[in-house]
Image (cartoon, helix red, strand yellow):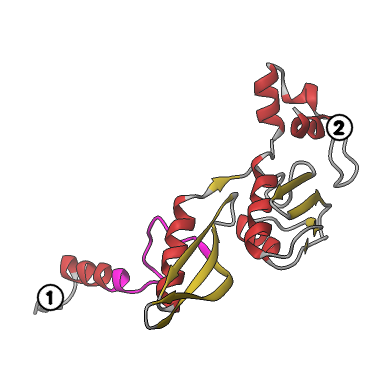
Amino acid sequence: MAQAPQRGGGQGGERRDRRDNRNNPAVAEGPDSDIVEKLVHINRVAATVKGGRRFSFAALMVVGDGKGRVGFGHGKAREVPEAIRKATEEAKKTMIRVPLRENRTLHHDGAGRWGAGKIMMRAAPPGTGVIAGGPMRAVLETLGVHDVVAKSTGSSNPYNMIRATFEALKVQSSPRQVASKRGKKVADLMGRRNDGASAPVEAEAVES
């Protein structure tokens, strides 16, 4: 005797599974599903108006995909969650791509400056970790750097430190980019590298 087909299978079951996955943020996939968000700084600001002072909050956010893309943004609103949302949206719109060596460290040393903020970064051998503090650490971790030595030698203002860090990251160049500009092969530019120090040819890319 033939058994009656079970209910809930076939296309109806597949549609229900897709609907459940769409409602589950851990399973749903989207363009921003792999974005890492970090709150760097939040500050309460006051504006003097007729009748007293009006308070609002300013948030500084850093976002990245951990694979060479990173951005920062700031937002201001009357409530903290709204300020964070505005800062996150701005950070996603201003993301930049930075070439990484072996997907773990920088290709060469770099320095950046913005206002009174001054920072320096050095490539490091495997196992060094992210030796940086404050806003710089947030930027490097969301970027996907695993081995780097960074130091801030200027202002401790988080906004200046973030912008100085991005100025240093914008001048990073990979050997492939340098070879393409000079019309040469990568093998002609690369020298032997016994440790995590910058290669001489790659260091020239910062100056040029």
Q: Position of residue 169 (x, y in %)?
A: 67, 46
Q: Circle 2 sits on which residue?
A: 200
Between 189 and 150, the one nearer to me in the picture: 150
Q: Amino acid at mark 1?
A: Pro
Q: Residue at x 39, y 69 (%)?
A: 27
| Frontmost residue, 86 versus 10 | 86
Give percent across and percent down for residue 38.
56, 68
Alpha-carbon span between mark 1 and mark 2: 72 Å
Quadrant in the picture for residue 26:
bottom left
- Element class at badge 1: loop
Range covered by the magenta-colored residues: 20-36
Position of residue 43 in the picture relative to residue 25 (left or right): right
Q: Is residue 10 magenta?
A: no
Secondary element under disc 2, as helix, strand or loop, is: helix
Q: Which residue is drawn at the image coordinates 62% and 61% (left, top)?
A: 159
Q: Is residue 54 above or below residue 98?
A: below
Q: Is residue 190 left or right of residue 178?
A: right
The residue carrying mark 1 is 5
Q: Nearer the viewer, residue 153 or 140?
A: 153
